[in-house]
Amino acid sequence: MAAATKFMFGTDFREGSRRAAGEADVAQARSEGFQAGLAQARAEAQDQTGGLVARLLQSIERLASQDHARLDEVEWQAAQVAISTARRLAGAALADKPMAGLENAVRECLGHARLAPHLVVRVNEASVETVEGMLARLTRETGFAGKLVVLGEPDIAPGDGRIEWADGGFVVDQAKLGQLIDQAVESAFGAGRFRGIVE
């Protein structure tokens, strides 16, 4: 086992042996302290700037999201107003001219089925006489030479009808058309958003 050595103090703490710090040492210490403080201030400023930038980016994302939501809401409201207005106008037009849609459909069909031997038009049973008069006028206007048959059926809504000929047919169904419009709108703007529109 090695012998223990006694610790010896090598520093002389007496008054006269103290080493006085020179101006150069003080200047160096100040410079080092200043540089350390400057480096710490820069690091803190970068941390604060990074935090501010992060919060700013979060605010921008939140505002962009809110803006997108507002635009969606404006589009939805505009579409709601347009559909509601269109339905009211369509209802007023049907009330004023309930056979206008059917008349246009028959006119179109007479153009396509000009050489057909006969054309059958199925309408609401209360509309048979009105449709017969309309068809007589349309055959004169279009030059259709075939036979026209008008049949009244209770399950067809007033203003609607089915037009049939040997090679084809056509259906005028306002309720079905409204459903197709609703489906198209819901697929564009989201299911269920237009259920509350005034009809």
Image (cartoon, grey):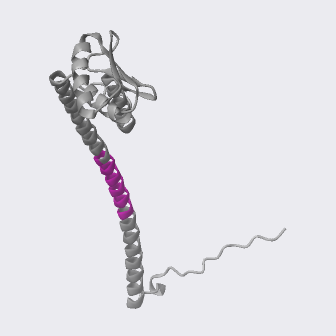
Name the residue: 32% across, 27% down.
Answer: 178
Query: In what quadrant of the picture does the C terminus appear?
Result: top left
Q: Position of residue 94 (x, y in %)?
A: 20, 24
> 148 or 47: nearer the eye?
148
Name the residue: 36% across, 70% down.
Answer: 41
Task: Report whether 120 appears left or right of 137.
Answer: right
> 34 or 198: nearer the eye?
198
Q: Is residue 57 magenta?
A: yes
Q: Position of residue 112 (x, y in %)?
A: 37, 35
Q: Position of residue 21 (x, y in %)?
A: 42, 86
Query: In what quadrant of the picture does the N terminus appear?
Result: bottom right
**Residue 143 sits above or below residue 129 on the image:** below
Name the residue: 42% across, 75% down.
Answer: 36
Specify start and end residues of the magenta stretch as a single range.
49-67
Task: Report whether 24 appears left or right of 136.
Answer: right
Q: Position of residue 78 (x, y in %)?
A: 23, 39
Task: Report whether 164 appears left or right of 92.
Answer: right
- Main SS, magenta residues: helix
Q: How many marks?
A: 0
> 39 or 9: nearer the eye?
39
Q: Is residue 62 magenta?
A: yes
